[in-house]
Amino acid sequence: MSTRRFLVTAVAIATLVIPTVAHGATIRVTSAKQPLFGNLEWSSGSARAFLADDGTPRALKANTALGQLVAATAFTGTALDVGEFAGIGVYVEAIGSEKVGPKGAWMFYVNGKAAQVGADSQVLRGSDEVIWWLDTDYGKKDPVILDLSAKTQADGTVLFTARKADGKGFKAAKGATIVIDGAKAGTTNAKGQLRVTPAGDWDAAHAELAGAIDSQIVNEPMGS
């Protein structure tokens, strides 16, 4: 089976006018080795095209997961290497310096569930949460990836909610450790929640759980 590779770089993208669709879907890119994009989750538009390494434009449907990744990597100046199986379709080979091995692939979850179609066919809704992750061995079980949110309550406390994505959806992450500005604040209950009374302003928090990939970094909610 023949393959082709497309090197989608920020420079290449800048040479092509790519209409992006305003979209509320969020994106995060991570691996067991290291998170990308500063381990942040953020909303991203979706590119409708990208340039192949030979300078040929490749069109995409509106609001695809691949289009979202193209837009996000272009915005952050992160290299994106996309391959193509002849007669089958495209696949992501490398994001930044993180490349797949002989038994691996870049995969993605949508709302905690493993995608059932390719990234160029997966159409996103505005409320979707996309997590790209590097699978180093597709013979092994998919990883558990943590997700964290923070909400300031009326009494000034902060409610942290940790969830775990395991390829079958989001579930409460019981026993996850919430780390605030480098210090452990406590562990989550059966609902994956921990209520904290901050001593003052805080900057960044994340969740950790044995055997799982750490959550993204969340910042102190605005207005708190």
Image (cartoon, helix red, strand yellow):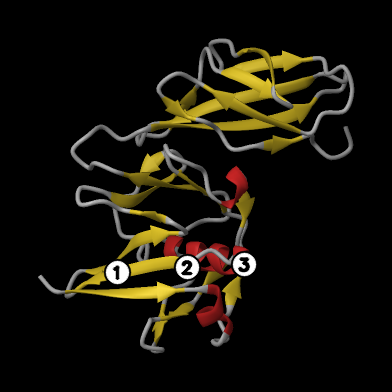
Q: Earlier in the sequence, mark 2 or mark 1?
A: 2
Q: Report, in whole angstroms, how far the alpha carbon at label 1 lies from the one at label 3.
A: 21 Å
Which numbered circle lies on residue 64? none
- Mark 3 and mark 2 lie on one chain; the one further toward the N terminus is 2
> Which of label 2 and label 1 is nearer to you?
1
Give the residue number, with chain letter if any, for mark 3: 75
**What amino acid type is highlighted by mark number 1?**
Gly
Q: Amino acid at mark 2?
A: Gly
From this viewpoint, is residue 113 visible?
yes
Say above or below: 127 vs 73: above
Task: Name which residue lies at 49% across and 20% down.
Answer: 209
Q: Residue at x 43, y 26 (%)?
A: 212
N-terminal label among 1 and 3: 3
Asked if residue 41 shows in the view, the reply is no
Of 51 and 34, nearer the camera is: 34
Disc 1 element: strand
